[in-house]
Image (cartoon, rainbow, N blue to C red):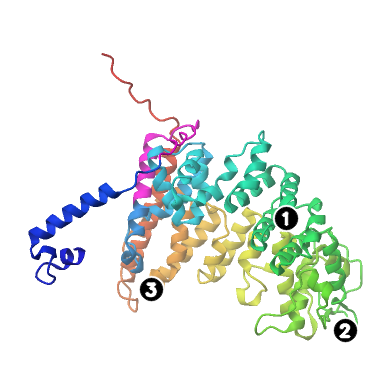
Amino acid sequence: MVAAALLGSERRRPPGGSVTALLDAAATETVRRRAGARPAVSRQRPEPAPADEREPLPSAAERRLATLLADRALSGSSPAGAASGRRGSGPDLGELLPQWLAEANARGYRAPAALLPALLDAARARTDLRAETLAFAGPRALWLARHNADWKFALRDGVRHQIPDEHPQETERLWQEGLFAERVALLTTVRQRDPQAALALLSSTWQTERAEDRLMFLDSLRLGLGPADEPFLERALTDRSRTVRATAAELLATLPGSALAARMAKRARSCVALDRMGGAGPALPQSSGHRRESPPAAGIVVKAPHACDADMQRDGVVAKPPTGRGERAWWLVQLVEATPLEVWSEQLGGLTPAQIVALPVADGWRDDLHAAWCGATVRQRNPAWARALIGEPTEPFSEGPGDPAKLLAVLPEEERGEWAARFIAAHGLSEAFRILGVCGVPWSLPLGRAVVDALEIARDAGSYPWSFSGVMGLAERCLDPADAERLAPLTAVPDEKEGESPGAGAYWAESFQRLVATLRLRSAMLAELREGRREEMPGPREG
């Protein structure tokens, strides 16, 4: 019957031999199916969604949110436009959602009920929106998520808002009976409020958890990690799962006073030492007020481990290196990464981090040793070592160890912006995208000017703007909105110069038009959210 209806009576003979007979049969089948359906089992009506007592959005801000969400949905359903590589001169509204949500949450507004489904759809598609979306959506997001499996991520990411401190029995019930995602979120929430209560909760069921679950639970201990967690983590070093053991070792290594850190430091000290036999050595940079407590060193000598014994493996050292990596170098890096950075000043003659980094390293071990120090710096969040390792902004990336963006993230926000501005002034934008991503929003005035100046230089060089689309996209989101009028002259199409790529000036003008329009839109968004209370709506007329 279906085949005849789809293909047509000319290609497939219908039941009964005619179109009329086919329609009669379809009608009969419809009645038969309806009559044969089993009655649905009655269920209790769900409890109403909880109230949200926060302030409602100003009306202009609510309209703006609806526009942003509609644009996100429209652009997400049109892959052809995204693949073209050019967006025209209009702002990309969907990319403004993160800032809009952050500002709305900072001002304590609640989400309009009618827009909650669209908000949850947006957060489902983009994980970077989830934290701010769920904070904005409030308890009603969890209520909706329980009735729609598409939004189940909210049960994991949003459960932290549903267990008040004064109901410990509810916490225990959810820990024992909740879904895995809910339990992970619950453990994180309790950890934020009371680290020891979270540890006790985890210890109560640790032996019965699956290995993959133990790994996720253990990862939540990063929040509020302290000396009181050490006994539990030491026991986890003997876990059946290799990944659990490795995570426990990593956490212990971030506790400078832990027994594991001391064991790693002892091993690392036997591998790295000063070489005082090579003469006076290089002139080392002196910090203000620093008094050298030992004779100048010729450099550093390294003696990497010759074996990875069982004790090292128990403490988290992975014995098998990645493809193309030597065993001894691999073991050395892991030992040094897990060693508290304060050890090296004592081990290397009382030198400062900058002086230590300036020392030559014998026998080609410099890159491995500096890379290990970079890993330790990022793990231990040590600004002094980050400054020493990242070096001056005038140095190209290729000459430094580790990932400069990760090292830069360790520094205070203001210092990050200053370093990035000087780097861009020295090198332009070719390597700037990674470091701009870790700078605070909005960018500081020096950083914003450095980026715009570099974009102007690239435009004047006659290249197309598409090579800098990533930086331009960051500028739209991160430049101070107050810069819009200062940048307005750049929206004009410049005169085409001889030898310039055809049409490059027009494309640059279009890019700057989009940048200025986005900055103006961001300024308007912030003003709408600052309106205060929604205008009083007229009440029902009497009579």
Callouts 1 and 2 close, C-beta under 8 Å: no
Closest to the observer, 422 or 108: 108
- Residue 328, compared with residue 411, is above or below; it is below
Q: CA distance from mark 1 to mark 2?
A: 54 Å
Q: Amino acid at mark 3?
A: Gly
x, y percent for residue 438? 58, 59
Who's the residue at 71% across and 62% down the image? 379
Q: Amino acid at mark 1?
A: Trp
Q: Say whether residue 444 is magenta.
A: no
**Mark in the foreground, 1 or 2:** 1
Q: What element does badge 3 sit on?
A: loop
Horizontal arrangement in the rendering, residue 52 relative to residue 176 (left or right):
left
Q: Amino acid at mark 2?
A: Gly
x, y percent for residue 305? 82, 80
Q: Is residue 404 visible?
A: yes
Closest to the observer, 395 or 107: 107
- Residue 514, compared with residue 536, is above or below; it is below
Q: What element does badge 1 sit on?
A: helix
Q: Identify the image quadrant of residue 168.
A: top right
Closest to the observer, 259 or 155: 155
Which residue does the numbered mark 1 point to in the structure image? 206
x, y percent for residue 321? 70, 80
x, y percent for residue 112? 41, 38
Who's the residue at 18% across and 65% down the image? 6
Horizontal arrangement in the rendering, residue 365 relative to residue 438 (left or right):
right
**Quadrant into which the N terminus falls:** bottom left
Give the magenta range.
42-70
Q: CA distance from mark 3 to mark 1?
A: 62 Å
Q: What element does badge 2 sit on?
A: loop
**Mark in the foreground, 3 or 1:** 1
Which residue does the numbered mark 2 point to in the structure image? 278
Which residue does the numbered mark 3 point to in the structure image? 462
